[in-house]
Amino acid sequence: MEKAIIITGAAGFIGSVLTGKLNQTGEKNLILVDDFSRKEKEQNIENKDFIQKIHRDHFSDWLDEHGQRVEFLFHIGARTNTAEFDVTVFNKLNLGYSKMIWEKCVHHKIPLIYASSAATYGMGELGYDDRHEIIPNLKPLNPYGESKNEFDKWVLMQKSVPPFWAGFKFFNVYGPNEYHKNRMASVIFHTYNQILKNGKMLLFKSHHPDFENGKQMRDFVYVKDLVNILIWFMQNKPTSGIYNLGTGKARTFLDLVNAVFDAVNIEPKIEFIDTPLDIRDKYQYFTQANMVKTIGTGYKKQFFSLEEGVNDYVKNYLIDQRFF
């Protein structure tokens, strides 16, 4: 039987774009893992080529039986809500589930790529450098970030490893197929919808003396660039390890919002509101991926600039509610 590539979280934002991109590279032998219960996520995988869907609760048993037919595993699925504070949810869906997948990949000798997060860096006290030695000392700001960092720490302590593995700390990802994410969707998505509704965008004020309003900075990475790197790592299998995945260039929220106004050809109108108290003390004012290690593996493709990515996303997806 022909070997298959597995994507967990396949009905979600990044997982579905990865599935579509794998299809474009000629990979049709895909097995999609998710809970598949949310109707609003169905369109993410509607026109994708794959051979089987497996509910995430049955995946462990499936791997026990069919692990030998897996060529590669992308573990993208996770509970990603940064405003969720029930640690037991993360312990089960992020930490425990990821350990199970790692152990099955070791047993069946399956190469593995998994999603970590820039949320592991907390306030960036130690910078945004993907050196393994700083990982035990990072201080994430919420249970989501903690669950991702705990798994990274656990991975680095393992003596038994898959034949190839890479964990990627995703920075601020935006792009098509995030329609279902509600509050957790990207600022580009919210900006576009606010402009349509009210003709203006509300941004959080700065509550930090070093940053003016709207000058808070993030490393915004277009999902098309992100999945290109994941697939390149699958194909080339450079040194195993934990890597950053951003652009390496922080941009302001004003840059981002202005790019959306530009894409819809409307004069910018921006107002500032107080950052909600429930997230104010956990708010990151600056993130920027150190991409030296990732690019040093030999990845050559040019990244979308923020303006190019926003323009592509708005004009080719958001305006007509299209999916990748």
Image (tube, helix red, strand yellow):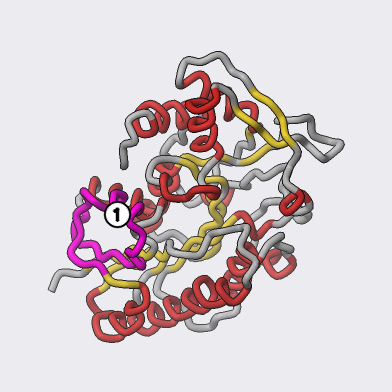
Residue 37 percent coordinates (x, y)? 34, 64
User: Measured along the vertical axis of the image, is residue 149 above or below residue 278?
Assistant: below
Who is closer to the viewer here, 98 or 57? Answer: 57
Q: Is residue 299 visible?
A: no
Helix, strand or loop under label 1: helix
Residue 38 percent coordinates (x, y)? 36, 59
**Residue 121: quadrant of the picture:** bottom right
Residue 81 percent coordinates (x, y)? 56, 59
Q: Residue visible at 35% across and 34% down?
A: 317
Q: Amino acid at mark 1?
A: Glu
Residue annotated with mark 1:
42
Q: Is residue 18 visible?
A: yes
Residue 69 percent coordinates (x, y)? 22, 75
Q: Residue visible at 37% across and 77% down?
A: 57
| Quadrant containing the C terminus in the rendered view | top left
User: Measured along the vertical axis of the image, is residue 277 above or below residue 114?
Assistant: above
Q: Residue furthest right?
A: 209
In the picture provided, is 153 more to the left or to the right than 31? Answer: right
Q: Residue furthest left?
A: 1
Does residue 29 show up magenta in the picture? Answer: yes
In the picture provided, is 59 more to the left or to the right than 299? Answer: left
The magenta segment is 27-53
In the picture provided, is 237 more to the left or to the right than 241? Answer: left
Q: Residue visible at 23% across and 51% down?
A: 46
Does residue 219 show up magenta in the picture? Answer: no
User: Measured along the vertical axis of the image, is residue 85 above or below residue 272?
Assistant: below
Who is closer to the viewer here, 87 or 151? Answer: 87
**Residue 215: quadrant of the picture:** top right
| Quadrant containing the N terminus in the rendered view | bottom left
